[in-house]
Amino acid sequence: GRDGPGDGGGAEMDPGDGGGGEIFGYKTQGCRKAMCIAGYIFSCGTLLLLFYWKPAWDVWANCIPCNLQEADVILLRTTDEFQKYTRKKVTWIDLSTLNLSVRDTSDSLFIADKDSVINRAIMKPELKVRSIQVQKIRYIWDLSVKQFQKVGSLDDSNSCYDIHHKFGTGLTREEQNIRYSPHHFQSIWYFRFKKILNPFYVFQTFTLTLWLSQGYIEYSVAIIILSVISIGLTVYDLRQQSVKLHDLVEEHNKVQVTACTKDEGCKKLESRYLVPGDILVLEGKKHSLPCDAILIDGGCIVDEGMLTGESIPVTKTPLPHTENTKFWKTHSAEDYRRHVLFCGTEVIQTKPTGKGPVRAVVLQTGFNTAKGDLVRSILYPKPMNFKLYRDAFKFIIILTSIGVLGLIYTVCVYVQHKVIAETVAMALLLFTVSVPPAIPAALTTGIVYAQKRLKNKKIFCISPQRINICGQINLVCFDKTGTLTEDGLDLWGLISSEGSRFQNVHSFASGTPLPWGLLCGAMASCHSLIVLDEKIQGDPLDRKMFEGTCWVTTKRVPGPGHNNFIAPVDGIAILHQFPFSSGLQRMSVITQQIGKDQYDLYMKGAPEMVTSFCRPETVPTDFVKELKVYTTQGFRVIALAHRALNMGKDVELDNLEREEVESDLTFLGLLIMENRLKAESKPVLEELSAARIRSVMITGDNLQTAVTVAKNSGMISQTSQVILIDASEPEGPTPASISWQLVEDSKQNAADTCVNIEERTSPERESNNYHFALNGKSYQVIVKHFKSLLPKILVNGTVFARMSPGQKSSLIEEFQKLNYYVGMCGDGANDCGALKMAHAGISLSEQEASVASPFTSQIPNVECVPELIREGRAALVASFAVFKYLTLYGLTQFIGTALLYWQLQIFGNYQYLMQDVVITLLVCLTMSLTQAYPKLAPYRPPGQLISPPLLLSVILHTGLTAIMLVCGFLLVKQQPWYSEMWELSLIYRCPPANHSLTIPNRNGTADATAAYSSVLSYEDTTLWPLTTINCIILAFVFSKGKPFRKPVYTNCKYSCINMCFPEIYS
């Protein structure tokens, strides 16, 4: 026992997709290694298996602590609650085999990027690099800073200037060879082997070997079948998922791309040979991107459905040619993604400039990419802290301890009777009886049944183990647009602003064409629509807005349609676009009217954001009041603004900074769009509320709109108060502040309402009298400056608006810290991170992004949420029932066998076979077929095996069983016809007897048994029916239906089997 892995060599690192980790250095010691090898041999591999399960013990036994620089073995430890250890061997990469030009001087560079970690990692003159690989990501030892650094991507420290000038002409062949690292993917057999080495399957192997050695041929065959079924069912879904992931990886390794190098020019090659820093030439045809890349020349339109879940064309712009020294991501702030082409996304259209073809610098390859990160998150999921699985393991340990007591008891009894030859075999036999081998098969089968029922309801699952966790969900987070409300938006009205005053509403329902003006120009041009295959494609909001102008678009030039006869312009050319970003909450375009020289800038976005870029005198004084009127009615409100740009004809639009032109705008007005609630949303939320399952809205939309939708949908009752929380960052001497305001009366002071939140830190103590609502900015401030208040706010927080994708994930993680079991339902747009973080993420998108979500519903509404919870509860209750049944069955058989051991007797082959296969196996395979109860109960099923009620029921039933069997054992001895059979029991290894119930390896002769009866002992004849009837009674006891499952009689197969058992026995 030690507090840490070692005394030296510790450091912090980020080992992969989860939180950070600690890294410790160790050096292998020869004598320790030799002792461990001897231990492997003398323990017949048991010690090696133990070290496989406990890698830290392996390292501590074989190695001594040292600093990281001298280490040949690395021990990683996660810093989360699981403290999981991983062992990694330090490998040496020999660069001398690459035929590099000789560079012995200490200041020589092997690659042109002087800041690259590769230059700092090469040991000279050996030309070797120390490396480790963690979750598919390679780290190399940085000689200057003395720590492992990640490779496989361009350094973030490069500025825009660096990327254009260092990598704009491509890499040399030598640099490519140094940077190249193959991307391997383990075969399916690796994952199967890993699954089979589960401790329980190893115990099964031991049990099977023992029974075979004792001549239990029939029973051993039955156990082999059980094991094959269990392992087969367990790896089936793993195989399906692994093949899918393998295909995801391979389809990007085999893409034919055009790459340019300094010394060889442009040529075709397979994408697997791309390295960070390569120049990728994007051709005009549609193709999937095999890597992450930074666009440096030209523009393109891509479909990012794989990442976002929505097949909406996104415009990408080249990285600006600025000469400042800011890191390229910092320079572009949150909007750096508009320059990045992500792996797995599809290039729909390229837009070359006059300089040449569209070019991009490879940023990341393989598992370092956005798609690679998605694959890694599935290969190495965050461990789910679910008590059922932890308690099951503890329970098996308890049963094993009981087995050890049985082993000691057997040794004492057999030694006392001086039957030494059979002592070891009989002791081990009783030891294995206490842990039923059917446990993994039965638990796996129950989950498979639940998965099949979900599939019939169009809900697909790629992580079956999470079905049981769904039974514990007590909080569900919903996205708004496309999830609770309809995907599409309908135009409701347009409110123009003139002279700092709002004008009358232009209603689109009237059918009157929108007159030409700046508002019409903004609606016609400020979008990201494209014409593809003679159809307008793009964001649904943009399409609706453009359709409202009655204009048509031809490539990049929108113009008046046939119905719009009053427009005095021929068209508007969209010259440059600053794409929409959920982080920036706005987009803008630079346009030019056909036949005119003037440039115009149009902006649209969140009203609060757009007005911050407008001149104050152009914003109506009643802007806030007018905005609230519409947002409180649940409308989606978009603000529009304009600026006339005074620029020369020779200006390079691609080099314009967004901040330069997005200022001093004139506020044009508000576009009001109606986002209707889906018909299914309100009934589902009412059902969840009746079941005491909290509902929370997490959306990127306006706060007032979100609150209104929450009220209309029933998420917030009409009688409840809604309190807006507004938190502000510190400014100069002013500290960070937080204010509270009732939605019903914006003028009411926070002091007028007293809310006690001091005691509200637990999910078990909820109140529906008030609900908190806040936006992403306030949430971020609270997380940073008011961390102690956060749990108290979250317990009654219901609406979280203007949340970025990262904030959504963070919020779900904070809920989980409060012991909530969180479900997340989203349409995939910006929800991927949250869907992965939640205990049960349900994607309503059929895009490839659904691979990030454990569950995907083909029916795009929230009815899937209560269905999933119902099935989860039924599966969880079934798992508990099966586990309790098998536990008590094992204990019953253990007690019966132990009593027979007192007489040096044992149940026969076919007796065991009848109980284990005919009764128990059939019960376990059919018990989980009972379907879920249609109504959600207002409480959850128990989630812990190690709990007083369950332990009490097991202990009491075990006690009653023991009393019943002991009484039967003693009463049969009191009968006048009873006679002991010691002489038969003590005759070993004779020809088998001609009787229906045999004793393995302890058979009497045919003549001896003929003189007596068809059984070998009265004790056996008494105890076997008692244990069998007890098993049948248990099957009925643990088949409880309501409130989580339908009544047992609805499970026809199970009921028929249980009714037939008495007939079979008789």
Image (cartoon, helix red, strand yellow):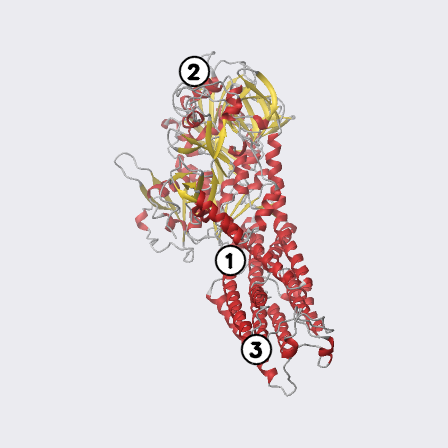
Callout 1 amino acid: Phe
CA distance for labels 1 and 3: 29 Å
The numbered mark, 2 or 3, whose residue comes first in the sequence reads 2
Which residue occupies the foreground of this view, 225 or 874? 225
CA distance for labels 2 and 3: 98 Å
Callout 3 amino acid: Met
Q: Residues within 10 Å of mark 2 (few under 14, many from 20)?
A: few
Q: Which residue is mark 3?
A: 964
Task: Label 1: state its secondary structure.
Answer: helix
The image shows residue 106 at horizontal and vertical percentages of 39, 21
Q: Can the viewer see residue 802 in this picture?
A: no
Number of the label disc, if any, that sits on residue 1008: none
Task: Label 3: state its secondary structure.
Answer: helix
Callout 2 amino acid: Asn
The numbered mark, 1 or 3, whose residue comes first in the sequence reads 1
Q: Residues within 10 Å of mark 3 (few under 14, many from 20)?
A: some
Q: Are marks 1 and 2 in contact (CB under 8 Å)?
A: no
Which residue occupies the foreground of this view, 312 or 646? 312
Residue 491, placed above or below residue 209: above
Residue 1048, placed above or below residue 196: below
Number of the label disc, if any, that sits on residue 646: 2
Q: Which residue is mark 1?
A: 393
